[in-house]
Image: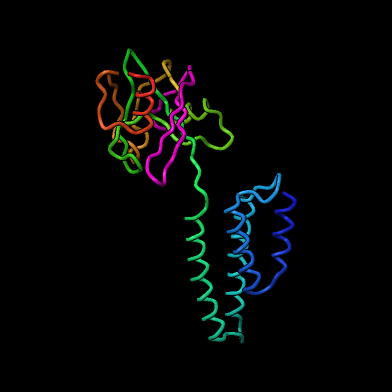
Amino acid sequence: MGLARTVVRILADEDGFHGMERCLAKGIEYQRKRRVDRGTDGNFLGQKLLELAHVRLFELGAKCFEPGRVHLSDVFCLVFHLCALSDIIRQSMQSIEKRPRVGVGVIVQREGKILLGKRKGSHGAGHWSCPGGHLEFGETVEQCARRELLEETGLKATSLVVGPWTNDVMNPDKHYITLHVFVSEFEGEPKLMEEHKCEGWHWFEWNQLPGPLFLPTKALIDKLNF
């Protein structure tokens, strides 16, 4: 992180809109490159520079309204740069390289049946899906599966088996690698824990599944040839 801190420190010493614009330009550049040298995360550096650009701009805005220093030209200049900064950041965020996210699906089985819930309030609304969610930073797949299962259904997994993964491109803006975990031993009965995300949990025979199925669930079934 030495290079990142050095660049931020140098740009932080600059005054006025010139310093803000350099922070902004370099932030966008590094976020697009992702890496600027070995051992330095370009995305981290880009984010820090964009944050610094915001700070510099607000400092300039505060100066415009200091007692005895209010000038119409300063106000117009501030508004212009606020609009420009907002537009440039919006465009840059759209152009930054997209990467797949990691999801974990939990296949809960009992007496030859699988637990599914109808999604609502997010992508895949109206589709039937297994419990699951995003793999959080620092989590193992098993920890994520236990957490998501408990949060969504109230079930406590006592035995897990990590299964296959699926490559799920939901739409042009959503691409997931889904890691599936099988749970056949658990404590409790399924409860609707997150009403804003699911309509309810139900057991289904493997050969009598409802439709439509959420893409990761469907992709897993196709992969297993059920």
Vertical side of 14 occupied by 138: above or below: above
Q: Is residue 152 magenta?
A: yes
**What secondary structure prevails in the magenta region?**
strand
Q: For residue 174, which quarter of the picture?
A: top left
Q: Is residue 168 left or right of residue 117?
A: right
Count of numbered tags: 0
What residue is at 69 percent from the left and 59 percent from the top?
8
What residue is at 63 percent from the left and 64 percent from the top?
23
Q: Position of residue 36 (x, y in %)?
A: 67, 51
Q: Is residue 127 left or right of residue 42?
A: left
Q: Position of residue 50 (x, y in %)?
A: 59, 60
Q: Which span of residues is magenta-colored?
A: 151-180
Q: Is residue 60 magenta?
A: no
What residue is at 25 percent from the left and 27 percent from the top?
210
Q: Is residue 16 left or right of residue 129?
A: right
Vertical side of 87 occupied by 149: above or below: above
Q: For residue 68, which quarter of the picture?
A: bottom right
What color scheme is it? rainbow
Q: Position of residue 159 (x, y in %)?
A: 48, 16
Q: Is residue 178 left or right of residue 116?
A: right
Image quadrant for the C terminus? top left
What residue is at 33 percent from the left and 43 percent from the top?
121
Q: Position of residue 142 (x, y in %)?
A: 52, 25
